[in-house]
Amino acid sequence: MSKFRRYGPAFMPAAALAAAFLFYPGDGAASEGTPAGPGSWKIGWTAESGYLKQSYGEHSKISVHLPDFVRNETAWSDKTILIPGLGGGFLTDNPLLHGAMYSNIRFTAEKDGISILTGLMVEHRGASYGVYTMDCMTAIPEFHARIDTFFDIAGRRIRFGISAGNYNDFKLGEGLTVYNLDMQGGSVHAGWRGLEARYTQIGDLSMGIGLAVGEMMDYTLSLSDIPLFRSISMDLQAGLYKIGETHSFNIPDEGSNFSAALEHPRGMRAYSQLGVRSVTESSQSGIQRCAHLAGVDYRLRKWNLDARLVAERRYYGRYFNLGYKSGTDEFFYRSNSIYDQPSTVGDYLYPLRNFNRPFSQWAVYAEYQGRDVQTMILRTEARYDLPRGFSLLCDLDLNRIEVSSEEDFLYSFYDAGAGWEPVGDILLKITHTNRGMNLDMHYPTLYQMKNGTWMIELRANLAF
């Protein structure tokens, strides 16, 4: 692996972070986060389960709305031999039309700053396959361990922690690249007051979601909860990243990151992150080797309304994402054998529990190799409570993608209807939606149906 190059101006944010620390008053006892003291093990378990069913028939031809760039690449793919409807712009076979179930059972143990999680994610991919089918049934183990402790050095309390295992819905920094995905890896951190140094290592993503990103190493220095004015606080981060080389392009797989966020206790958070990829050719310099994220996250709880609004602007230069698209023309989440069709399980699994996640993820933008990509995102999740456990639900996920040399495209996902919670942590939802499960890409994503469908979801989240 090549050594990190000198980044010049890219290190200026780190200097700003250091300067902020000099003026950061801190609050010794309040910010040191003393781990739990000696005691007996605290044991618990959780069960997160769900059933999902959409109303269209298995052999119905449901048209989907796709950008021309994605549609053309799909139509010319060898995968259309296995699923002819794939090249025609139709929704393909997936677990939701069969009535699928999942259960995520986890056991936890905590004592003296040590926590251990071990679990099992089990799925039955559809009643159409039979009660005891083995072809469309999965069981995946999960494990996570963490140690949080401290040392007193020269009268200073130094925090130290290490963790490893499974990380679900993981986000690195403010989420410019690594976000909205599950990963395996580890992390080590040490800190004093609001200052923290952290090293994070992420396992090979090209083998999990086909992002063509090898093992990632991230080195971050952060300063948290800097008091400003009117109860507003600031977080700052600066660091370097290194990716295991997965392609033959003459461009380094390393760079720098800087992020900042402002947070108000009334539910408002504004955040931004800049990524700069190192280059060796002068023709690759400038903004096209950069990526940038700016967003606002607002949570409103008032009267019977619980709503969240997220607005983001994302930009990825053509050299920033160069080489990070999977080169395979095979299915990740289906069988690649003509004798195993239809299929909803391949070499990897698209978990049912991930279907309700937002559309936006790094792999969506890396799809457009050799292009500059900009996207504007507006997401809302709203719930209005009615008497006797009933509620009105509305989720919107709007993504306007602007790609150089391509027509602009709007993904406009919706899921709206009613819910009933007869007892706490048990929710029955009946909604109308245009979100469809897409098992045909090299990353877990969604189809946008031109005509929506009814969906029923029964969800249980139990904890003891």
Image: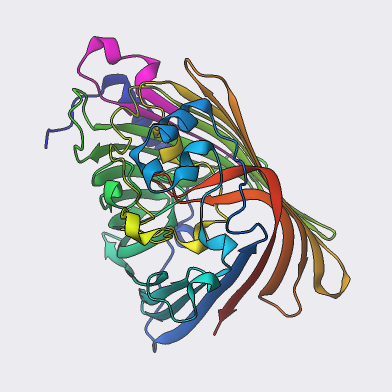
x%, y% of residue 365? Answer: 44, 33
Q: Nearer the viewer, residue 325 or 223?
A: 325
Q: Is residue 41 above or below residue 191?
A: below
Q: Magenta region: which residues?
A: 269-291
Query: What residue is shown at x 74% (from left), y 63% (from top)?
Result: 430
Q: Is residue 273 magenta?
A: yes
In screen coordinates, is 226 left or right of 255?
A: right
User: In the picture, which quadrant includes the N terminus?
Assistant: top left
Query: Is residue 176 something that shows in the picture?
Result: no
Give coordinates of residue 372: x percent, y percent: 43, 21
- The colour scheme is rainbow
Residue found at x 45% / y 44%:
84
Residue 180 versus residue 56: which sits nearer the camera? 56
> To which quarter of the image does residue 151 belong?
bottom left
Corner quadrant of residue 281: top left
Above/below status of 153 relative to 371: below
Q: Can residue 393 be seen?
A: yes
- Judging depth in this view, the residue of 213 and 274 nearest the camera is 213
Q: Is residue 275 above or below residue 125?
A: above
Count all numbered tags in the image, as a single digit: 0
Q: Residue at coordinates 12% horizontally, 33% vertically from top-left? A: 2
Residue 357 in the image, given as x and y percentages of width and height: 55, 53
Position of the C terminus, as image quadrant, is: bottom right
- Magenta segment includes 312: no
